[in-house]
Image: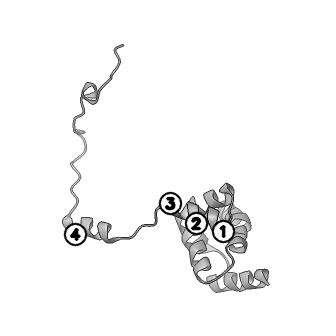
Amino acid sequence: MRSKEKALDYRYFPEPDMPPLVISDETMKRLNDQTLEIPHEVIKKMKEEYGFNKEYINALIGDKEMLDYFLALVEEKFDPKISAKWLVGPIAAWMKENFKPVSQLPATSDQFKEFLKIAQE
């Protein structure tokens, strides 16, 4: 077999069974206007500001809904370490066991926040 050394050797061509992807200007503008937090920045913040280890970080960034829930708690001035401890531990275990996202916890958001207040004290 001969080796392929350059891109031309692969002879790229459009997939005949797939139509071309056309993205409207409106969609492009909407996507460009969205502000996205780069994962690297989130990871850096979790390491430096919160002192999280890689297991906590991976558990939180591995699920966008869980990350958003955690960031909302931190924004409301809940202790990041206590919040992460409960989200990554028992909450994540419950979610995995029951195949449910964090939005479907049996406790409401207010109930969980009240629990975290007690845990912080």
- Picture disc at residue 39: 3
Does label 1 or label 2 sit earlier along the sequence?
Answer: 2
In terms of sequence position, does the residue under pointer 1 or pointer 3 come before the other? 3
How far is the residue under mark 3 from the one under mark 4? 26 Å
Residue type beneath disc 3: Pro
User: Front-most of 49 and 98?
Assistant: 49
Residue 25 drawn at (x, y percent): 19, 65
Q: Residue furthest front?
A: 48
Would you name the residue on which mark 4 appears? 26
Q: Quadrant of the C terminus?
A: bottom right
Q: Point out the frontmost of discs 2 and 3.
A: 2
Q: Name the residue beneath numbered marker 1.
A: 50
Amino acid at dot 1: Tyr
Q: Position of residue 88 (x, y in %)?
A: 69, 64
Marks 4 and 2, Cα distance to the nearest angstrom?
33 Å
Report if the CB atoms under discs 1 and 2 are less than 8 Å apart: yes
* Residue corresponding to mark 2: 45
Q: Earlier in the sequence, mark 3 or mark 4?
A: 4
Q: Nearer the viewer, mark 4 or mark 1?
A: 1
